[in-house]
Every structure is written in C-alpha cells, then in structure tokens.
Amino acid sequence: MNIPGILISVLSATVSACNPQTPSPPYQPPKPSTMQEINQFAGTIEQIGSRVKRLDLADELFAETSFRDIYENPQAYLASASAIIARHGVSAHHKKIIGYAMQQLPPEQFVMFVTAMTESVEQGTTDMETLETTVFTPLNWGRQSLIGHYQQPIVQALLARLLAMPQLSSVNRHYIRDDILTGKARQDFLDYRDMIGRPVYE
C-alpha cells in the first residue's frame, strides 16, 4: 500500500490517539457554535475544496494547512461540522472534506458526527456516498473508531442503523457484517499499523 508521505507524518504525531486500546478522554458534548463560527468554518471548507479536487489523494488534503488544523483538533469544530452537514445546498465535495477532517474524533464524538450525517441522509440533505466515504475510510486515516471499538454498544447501535438503511451499498453491508462485527477489520487495522512500523500496543 502506498502511504502518503504527509499522512505518515500526521500519523507519527498522533500515534497514541490512534491506539484503539488507549482510553478516550471523558466525553463532553460539543459547545454549540455561533452562526459566525459556523459560517467561518463553512468558508474554510469552501477554500479547501476550491484548491483540492481529488479527495482520493490524501497528500493534497494534507498539503492544506487549514485542513490539517481541523484534522488534528476536530473536537473544536464538531458542532460547526454537524451543522453544515445538515444544510441544504452544501456540495457533496465539501461534505466529504468535512468527513475526512473529522476522522480523529474520539469514538463517542465520531459516533455523534456519523449519526448527524446519517440523519442528514435520511432527510435528503446529504447523499449516501458521502456518508459511506466518511464511515469507511482507508486504514491510513484517523482513529478508525468504529472498527477499533466495534464491541461498544453505541458503535453497535450505529452499525445496526447503517445496516437498516436500504441505500447502503452491498459491499459495505457485507463489510460491516463480515469484517467489522466479527473483529476482522480491527485485526486488519492492527496488522496495517505493524506493517507501517506504527504498532498499536495492547
């Protein structure tokens, strides 16, 4: 697997945060964002989106300082991100950038964010591809909270909700059932971290 150089440096700086066995900080609901904060965040995402056209090339996203700032401190932007995800008129491209930027959220907050996006899909303001892009990122992205904490009740409830969605692709439906819920995906993540020389210590 070809791992983007910039992403490797981010992983190196956040290795302890990516450890599925490291206890997460106590959960705290995000502070409500003011309209000014929401609009400022939306403007930042629009600027990133105007410069980054290929979201499958992680190096391009991580070349953006503003994207790295959000990615490394996503809790500070969670309320604004959730508000924008619920908006009509925000492009799928911009919502996918937000989804990638939230990958370092601790498990409880990531479940909250994905739940907000799921509700947005159900309400018709976000497309299913954006949700699946956010939930099923490659193993070199973020904490991998859902596969790392698949046994937690809040994660299992979210996965069950995703499985109940008729729009969910057959590929990802099988991935949830056969890989995530069996623990195979978690083991794949641990093996991947060993492969790149960033082992997760259990």
Image: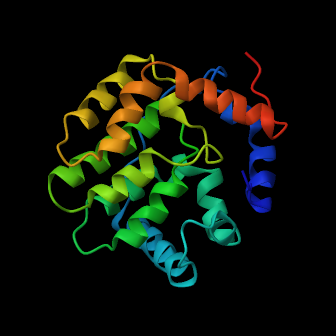
Q: How is the image coloured?
A: rainbow
Place of residue 169 in the rendered image (x, y in percent of width and height, measured from the top left) = 29, 47
Q: Is residue 63 left or right of residue 127?
A: right
Residue under the image location 36 percent in, 34 percent down: 174
Place of residue 4 in the rendered image (x, y in percent of width and height, measured from the top left) = 74, 60
Q: In this picture, is 124 found above or below 190?
A: below
Place of residue 82 in the rendered image (x, y in percent of width and height, measured from the top left) = 35, 53
Front residue of 141/167: it is 167
Please say whether residue 50 is visible from this viewpoint. Answer: yes
Residue under the image location 33 percent in, 30 percent down: 159
Front residue of 138/18: it is 138
Kindly indicate the quadrant of the structure image that contains residue 105. Answer: top right
Q: In this picture, is 46 found above or below 96?
A: below
Place of residue 100 in the rendered image (x, y in percent of width and height, measured from the top left) = 52, 56
Kindly indicate the quadrant of the structure image that contains residue 87. Answer: bottom left
Q: Is residue 2 left or right of residue 89?
A: right
Residue under the image location 61 percent in, 55 percent down: 71
Q: In this picture, is 119 found above or below 194?
A: below
Query: How many numbered circles does the render carry?
Result: 0
Please say whether residue 36 is visible from this viewpoint. Answer: no
Residue under the image location 57 percent in, 83 percent down: 51
Q: In this picture, is 182 found above or below 173?
A: above
Q: Where does the C terminus fall, quadrant-wise? A: top right
Residue lying farthest to the right in this orientation: 197
Q: Is residue 9 left or right of residue 39?
A: right
Kindly indicate the quadrant of the structure image that contains residue 12. Answer: top right
Residue lying farthest to the bottom in this orientation: 50
